[in-house]
Image (tube, grey):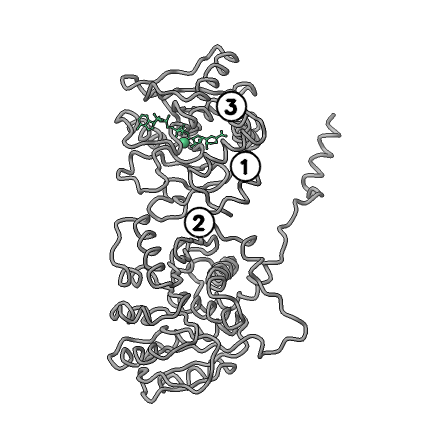
Amino acid sequence: MKIFSDKQIFEGDKLTAERHNITSTELMERAGIQIFNWLDVRMQGAQVPIHVFCGIGNNGGNGLVVARHLINHGYNVETYVVNFSVNRSKDFLVNYDFIKQITKKWPTLMGPKDDFPEIGSEDIIIDAVFGFGLVLPAADWVVKLFQHFKASEAFTLAIDLPSGMETDEVPADENAVVWASHTLSFQAPKLAFFLPDTAKYTTQWEVLDVGIDPNYLINTPIDIELIGKQEVLPIYKMRGKFSHKGNFGHALIIGGSYGKIGAAILASRSALAVGAGLVTAFLPKCGYIPMQSSIPEVMVITDEQDEFISNIKFEIAPTVIGLGVGLGTTKQTEESLKAFLKTNKTPLVIDADGINLLAKNKDLLSLLSENTILTPHPKELERLIGKWKNDYEKLKKVKAFSKKYKLIIVVKGAHTLTVLKNRIYINSTGNPGLATAGTGDVLTGIITGLIAQGYEPLKAAVFGVYLHGKSADIAVQDLGFEAMTASHVIETLGDAYIDLFTQPESPKAERNEEDKKEGENKKNEK
Ligand SMILES: NC(=O)C1=CN([C@@H]2O[C@H](COP(=O)(O)OP(=O)(O)OC[C@H]3O[C@@H](n4cnc5c(N)ncnc54)[C@H](OP(=O)(O)O)[C@@H]3O)[C@@H](O)[C@H]2O)[C@@H](O)CC1
Ligand SMILES: [K+]
């Protein structure tokens, strides 16, 4: 799913009005009806008090449309205009007139000196105070109103985005933002919903199609994309009937050190499970028996040293190399990595101590060929690019780093981000069960195994991150977050592939036996 900028949505709205010969007021009406329907389906006419707080811009205009439809359908509505400015937007004013025409209970105008209305914890708040037009700072009394919302503990539905949330900065004061229970975002989700610093301002979010011209949406280029099943399906390479193991490449995993051979085992097993034709592991001697006895399918080449890698040398010609898991950072390993990178021409996926050694020897970065993949966790990333003050600055630095060295950076986190220059791919799969030892080694193996099969590095990174998260989502259903381990994530990789082609179940046409009986009883009572 494309993630559009505010400017693009604004342009799209304007262009839709022109192309379809429709006024902006009519477009606002459509959007408002969508929001009303969303609520109506869930509330079914319930008389829960609904407090609609509207600003004076177009977000406020959206709020007024919703309030009008709620009133027309007999809901228990109080409408307020948070009157923080005299610069009311045209469509706010039109809808302000409309609402006055359908009810005697006109919206209450709220100013800095007014008391806030009482809001019960079982009530509903609709937050239409600010959308993306907010220019900081909001007035103190408006910030206090947001705190009043939060203190009420009422279900808070934000229109487009929680008021006070900016779309390109982390709010300096978390009290100056509405903490929404649910956000109905127009046409596309906002980047802020995926970043740890800002995701907390809405527990859930959903996208509403507000009717922006589909051609505009298809043809407008974007820098950020949310990756779900629809986005990875076209990446998937179907296997031909006459294919053989030689078609699916040879992955080499270089890693492991005394006490950390398990990392190389996990990566090797993942490369196999994701479909690599052949997998070889290059290990220190102490890794030979553990690897051979735990995965018979994997071939092993050993270093001269027992406990760490000292000289990366092999006579095979792998399709791709996954380097760094459990590698350690001894001086000899560091020197062997330097020597190896000077001559290596094979595509690389670099993780863990491989990244740490690059961070220590930044001159090595320019030796990496274009589209080499680095998969850092936050600490490794910090060693590479330095500290950041917030998620937006982090992204800016990652993009600059990727551009400078022409590398693909997989920024691991709750929503893993794959970055290539200005492009960002936000992953939608995965769960907190992945916060456990070895899951990073599994990801390295998966991406390496995909490249072995002929996936281009960027596609392998995006698809690999998706499969890894999906596999964990499947595994967690039987195991729960706590008991799931990295090995389980490998075991369900097959199910993650199968899920690509599984259609969601359609609602059951037949009612269950209980429902049927109840229906019969009611008929008999009549
Ligand atoms: N089809 C539809 O229905 C569509 C509807 N859309 C909806 O429009 C929303 C954007 O609307 P918006 O641009 O009018 O700005 P909004 O966020 O309502 O409020 C800001 C207003 O307050 C003002 N203001 C700002 N900061 C202030 C401050 N600190 N203190 C005082 N005043 C301040 C600012 O005034 P200005 O700076 O212009 O003078 C502006 O008027 C968007 O989020 C979505 O809900 C669009 O998505 C398109 C499709
Ligand atoms: K809002």
User: Quick one: 497 or 522, which is closer to the camera?
Assistant: 497
**Which residue shows up at 52% across the image and 81% down it?**
297
Q: Position of residue 424 (x, y in %)?
A: 42, 53
Q: Which residue is tagged 1?
A: 209
> As displayed, is residue 269 above or below residue 63?
below
Which element carries disc 1, helix, strand or loop?
loop
User: Distance between the Cα atoms at labels 1 and 2?
Assistant: 18 Å
Q: Amino acid at mark 2?
A: Ile
Q: Amino acid at mark 1?
A: Asp
State the image quarter where residue 151 is shown: top left
User: Distance between the Cα atoms at labels 3 and 1?
Assistant: 16 Å
Using the image, tell me which numbered label, if any, was put on residue 25: 3
Residue furthest out toward the front: 18
Q: Position of residue 168 (x, y in %)?
A: 35, 42
Which element carries disc 3, helix, strand or loop?
helix
Which element carries disc 2, helix, strand or loop?
strand
Q: Which residue is tagged 2?
A: 224
Quick check: 335 left or right of 413? left
Q: Position of residue 321 (x, y in %)?
A: 43, 75
Q: Which label sits in the foreground, 3 or 1?
A: 3
State the image quarter where residue 308 is shown: bottom left
Disc with the residue nearer the chain's start (1 vs 2): 1
User: Distance between the Cα atoms at labels 2 and 3?
Assistant: 29 Å
> As displayed, is residue 476 above or below residue 30?
below
